[in-house]
Image (tube, helix red, strand yellow):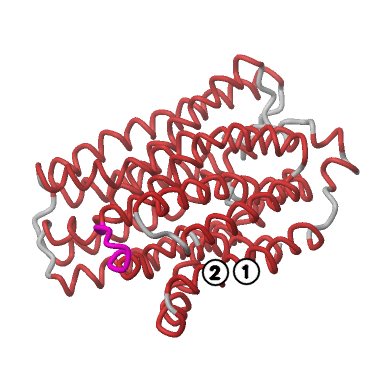
Amino acid sequence: MSVLAIGQLIGWGTTFEAVGAIGRKLGSDLGLANEIVFAGLSVMMMTSAFASPLTGRMLERFGASRVLSIGTLFFAAGLCVLASAQGVIGYITAWIILGLGAALALNAPAFTAVVEREGVEGKRTIAILMLFTGLSPTISWPLLNLLHDLIGWRSTFLWAAGLQVFVCLPLYLFGLPKPVAREAARISANTAPVPLTAAGKKAAFIFVALSTAIASFVTFGLSPSLLEVLQQSGATPELALQLAAARGVLGISARGFDMLLGKRGNPFLTSVSGISLMVAGFTSLLLLPPSTVSLWIFVALYGFGSGILVVARALLPLALFSPSEYGRQASRLMMPQNIANAIAPILFTALLDRTGVSTALIISIMLTLVALCSVILLISLVRKARRTAGTITPSQP
């Protein structure tokens, strides 16, 4: 697990999180508007989305270790191109390459590495990895700013490329144990937790894809504009900063709470709880009179709800499909999620600027209710499949 934790911290910290730390500084040197600089993240997410189906096939054929290793090489290449960029063409090209690296080295391939080694028992390890991902900006932002001040942003990205080649690549190639699920427990690896028919698998995939993509869309759409949402809802700039910081702490705490549940955790019920908390948060901010109390209520509900949903999104495929299918299905699910992540900030920013916070909240409520209905339909499908097979127990959804 430590190998994957280090790899994910470096992977997220040197790519996606780097823009938040030093994006504006490199933008001024390159003569690029901040909108173009931050659009690199959308390019990265969109590229990753369209590469996700290929990632799934590669995971099935080659295994997670090789796929993660290839991803680190794409990261290193993209960071080198970014370090040498002289304008918008080089900058966008770098993010396309980094997007390919993200598809091969972030989230789904790392979770697949866990499932290959632990099978369906890997829920707690995946939750721990999600906790490290949440800590990535806390660790990477100060370090990137320090390096920028000492050696400049170009050399900083070259150092980041070196970390990919000289730290992540050897760890992925030589530091991961052999996949137990595929060698020592092949029968178990091909046994799905839910006895779904072929049609049932398709329906389950659609429900999961719809609910997770909507949750990602709302979360990624609101997060960059959270300060604006809070200020339009009556918060002072100082209070808005405090609330936004509290939301980050709550999100990480929620991931830690899910990790502590371990085997007792249930991603179906966690998804319902997380989405319900988000709906309650949006509704409270929309209907309660503007006050410091109502703002704290919103941040508490939204922060904790969105935090536990992050873990639920990673664990839902493991609760439905066999370990041998996990990599392919999880990678396929990343496509709609990453598309949503790419376009959501742009759409929500335009929505807030042109129509105000009330409209944004109403649309968020409507979307999250659709996601909630999708999860409820998924639970109904799972219960029906288990009743048909005679395997349902009182503790299962």
Relative height, residue 105 to residue 198 (above, below):
below
Q: Quadrant of the N terminus?
A: bottom right
Q: Quadrant of the C terminus?
A: top right
Q: Name the amino acid type tagged 1.
A: Gly
- Residue under label 2, please give it: 158
Q: Residue at x 29, y 47 (%)?
A: 345
Residue 148 in picture, x, y percent from top left: 42, 78
- Residue under label 1, please give it: 162
Find out whether residue 28 is within the magenta segment: yes
Q: Report if the CB atoms under discs 1 and 2 are less than 8 Å apart.
A: yes
Relative to 180, 321 lies left or right: left
Residue sitting farthest toward the top: 199
Relative height, residue 356 to residue 53 (above, below):
below
Q: Residue at x 74, y 58 (%)?
A: 172
Find out whether residue 3 is within the magenta segment: no
Question: Front-most of 165 and 227?
Answer: 165
**Gap between marks 1 and 2 measured at Cα:** 6 Å
Relative to 289, 200 lies left or right: right
- Residue range highlighted in magenta: 27-34
